[in-house]
Image: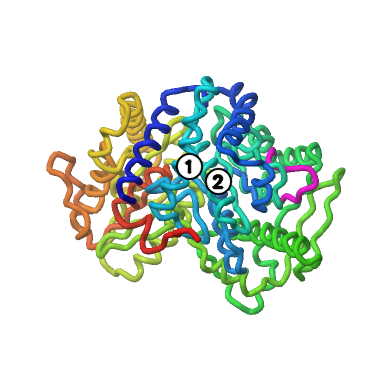
């Protein structure tokens, strides 16, 4: 029953995504600013969700360009370590839609997911004649379903990650979050949010609410000014988080479950969000605040103040250490091939991802003491500038680069509409063309220029990159280009997959077939 039910879920979800992808309305700024939230309010009513019940979920709302997923994961891990029943809504998924909704860090079983899916789906289907002009996207549907799950499963706290922007994002139907977090700001989704940091910051700060505390990380001055002004307009308080070194770690090692220097400030933001949430929770339930120490005050007319650091409880330290977020600075080792997976897709995040890869691959190379070759598997999605990302990757000395669309295998080609398939393959070829034009300036100092090839799916790209050295991956196909001699002669291959979190998810699905369940699923109470 579970298998058949879940197959019906996948079929229905694919239909929702396919129908949404055929409409360009979501790329229209006018629709986004005027109809996004009113339509979401209608959807909320249609599935019998009460906004007071949503606010009763004690939400930590997180927006930003880079680091939303990391901060949300840190928050979930810390609060779970403190004994709270957590709900996490994050996107995108890597392999299956089920990953977006987690309870106590666990993905829902297929049975539980199917039950809640059809609860929402059937209510929307039965009322669609009354709302003929509204159009449902996959993200909106999953947001509705997540709220429904969290309300019925009676979680203590929900960490709610924004989809796009903030002010007009469908998650912003939340009226009174316990606390708000704004991560690193960068240019992204410029077709909807504008092409300046100022406009991006305006949208991201739109999730602030009157009288509710908000925290952000150090930003460029233009962004900081906008965040301060926007919070002032909304009558919200906002503070900057301190450096991770400023906290008292009680003599314990400063260890984070997520690798990379950039995760330090994400961890600090999560610490402040969780401290504030726990203080409010304790005050609400016992009229006592947790003993974390005082934070600095905020002046509506002055600069944003920096929140105080404090002595970290053991539960915070263990929560930070045990945090896990696949697809971000993730390493998968298979005998003679090591896969480095990072979904960086903006120049700022790519710079951080390249720094992590160079350090992690160099550290591994020292332990191998054999011939090592590096291969890049790359893609960027529509609307992003491949050149800006490839400029950072030029310093990694790849022997070869494979360009792949966000498609797992040839079997998945039938699930794509013809228009989408043509678009994805065209973008893939354009990315390679950009790379070819840049080879001179990127690799001028190298004795030989790296080989590149385009593929129709991630499986073929992985086969080519692994070059027969991974016993779990088939050998390269005969019809594909011959891999460079340096890779064929290497004893070990280091493969970096980056540029698109969707591509990273496809590769994870290839490398770890049981990734979604892996023995850890939530079956309901």
Dot 2 and dot 1 residues touching (CB under 8 Å): yes
Residue 255, magenta (yes or no): no
Can residue 262 be seen in the rendering of this structure? no
Above or below, 520 relative to 488: below
Can you give x and y, in whole percent of width and height, for residue 480 in the image? 17, 40
**Label 1 neighbourhood size at 10 Å, few (<14), some (14-19), many (20+)?**
some
Can you give x and y, in whole percent of width and height, for residue 447 in the image? 29, 48
In the image shown, does 222 or 443 lie closer to the viewer? 222
Q: Quadrant of residue 242?
A: bottom right
Q: Quadrant of residue 264?
A: bottom right
* Residue, disc 2: 148
Can residue 365 be seen in the rendering of this structure? yes
**Residue at x-position 52% and y-position 61%:** 104
Can you give x and y, in whole percent of width and height, for residue 126 in the image? 48, 30
In the image shown, does 485 or 179 lie closer to the viewer? 179
In the image shown, does 29 or 139 lie closer to the viewer? 139
* Residue, disc 1: 119
Q: Which residues are magenta?
A: 206-214
**Residue at x-position 52% and y-position 48%:** 90
Residue 211, magenta (yes or no): yes
**Residue at x-position 31% and y-position 39%:** 407
**Label 2 neighbourhood size at 10 Å, few (<14), some (14-19), many (20+)?**
many
In the image shown, does 123 or 354 lie closer to the viewer? 123
Q: Residue furthest bottom?
A: 251
State which tag comes first along the sequence, 2 or 1: 1
**Residue at x-position 58% and y-position 43%:** 162
């Amino acid at each position: 029953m579970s298998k058949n039910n879940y197959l019906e879920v996948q079929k229905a979800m694919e239909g929702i995504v396919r129908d949404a992808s055929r409409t360009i309305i979501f790329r229209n700024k006018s629709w986004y600013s005027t109809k996004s939230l009113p339509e979401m309010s209608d959807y909320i009513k249609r599935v019998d969700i009460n906004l007071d019940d949503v606010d009763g979920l004690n939400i930590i709302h997180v927006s930003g360009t880079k680091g939303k997923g990391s901060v949300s994961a840190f928050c979930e891990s810390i609060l779970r370590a403190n004994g709270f029943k957590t709900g996490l809504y994050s996107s995108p998924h890597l392999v299956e839609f089920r990953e977006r909704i987690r309870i106590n860090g666990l993905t829902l079983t297929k049975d539980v997911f199917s039950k809640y899916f059809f609860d929402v789906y059937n209510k929307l289907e039965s009322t669609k004649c009354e709302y003929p002009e509204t159009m449902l996207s996959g993200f909106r549907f999953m947001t509705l379903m997540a709220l429904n799950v969290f309300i019925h499963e009676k979680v203590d706290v929900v960490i709610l990650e924004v989809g796009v922007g903030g002010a007009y994002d469908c998650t912003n139907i939340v009226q009174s979050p316990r606390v708000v977090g704004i991560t690193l700001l960068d240019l992204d989704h410029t077709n909807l949010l504008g092409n300046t940091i100022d406009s991006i910051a305006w949208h991201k700060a739109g999730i602030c609410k009157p009288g509710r505390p908000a925290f952000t990380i150090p930003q460029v001055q233009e962004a900081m000014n906008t965040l301060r002004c926007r919070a002032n307009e909304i009558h919200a308080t906002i503070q900057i988080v301190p450096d991770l070194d400023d906290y008292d770690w009680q003599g314990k090692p400063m260890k984070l479950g997520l690798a990379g220097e950039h995760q330090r400030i994400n961890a600090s933001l999560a610490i402040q969000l969780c401290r504030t949430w726990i203080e409010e929770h304790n005050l609400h339930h016992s009229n006592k605040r947790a003993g974390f120490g005082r934070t600095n005050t905020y002046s509506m007319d002055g600069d944003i103040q920096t929140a105080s650091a404090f002595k970290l409880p053991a539960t915070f330290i263990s929560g930070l250490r045990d945090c896990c977020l696949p697809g971000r600075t993730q390493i998968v080792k298979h005998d003679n091939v090591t896969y480095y997976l990072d979904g960086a897709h903006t120049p700022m995040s790519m710079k951080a991802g390249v720094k992590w890869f160079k350090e992690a691959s160099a550290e591994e190379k020292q332990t191998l003491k054999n011939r090592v070759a590096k291969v890049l598997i790359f893609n960027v999605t529509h609307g992003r500038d491949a050149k800006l990302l490839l400029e950072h990757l030029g310093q990694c000395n790849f022997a070869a680069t494979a360009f792949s669309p966000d498609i797992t295998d040839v079997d998945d080609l039938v699930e794509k509409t013809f228009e989408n398939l043509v678009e994805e393959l065209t973008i893939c070829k354009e990315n390679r063309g950009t790379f070819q034009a840049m080879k001179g300036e990127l690799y001028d100092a190298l004795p030989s220029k790296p080989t590149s090839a385009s593929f129709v799916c991630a499986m073929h790209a992985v086969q080519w990159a692994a070059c027969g050295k991974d016993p779990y991956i088939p050998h390269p196909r005969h019809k594909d280009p011959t891999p460079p001699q340096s890779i064929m002669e290497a004893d070990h291959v280091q493969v970096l997959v980056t540029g698109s979190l969707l591509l990273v998810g496809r590769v994870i699905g290839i490398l770890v077939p049981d990734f979604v369940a892996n023995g850890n699923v939530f079956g309901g109470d």
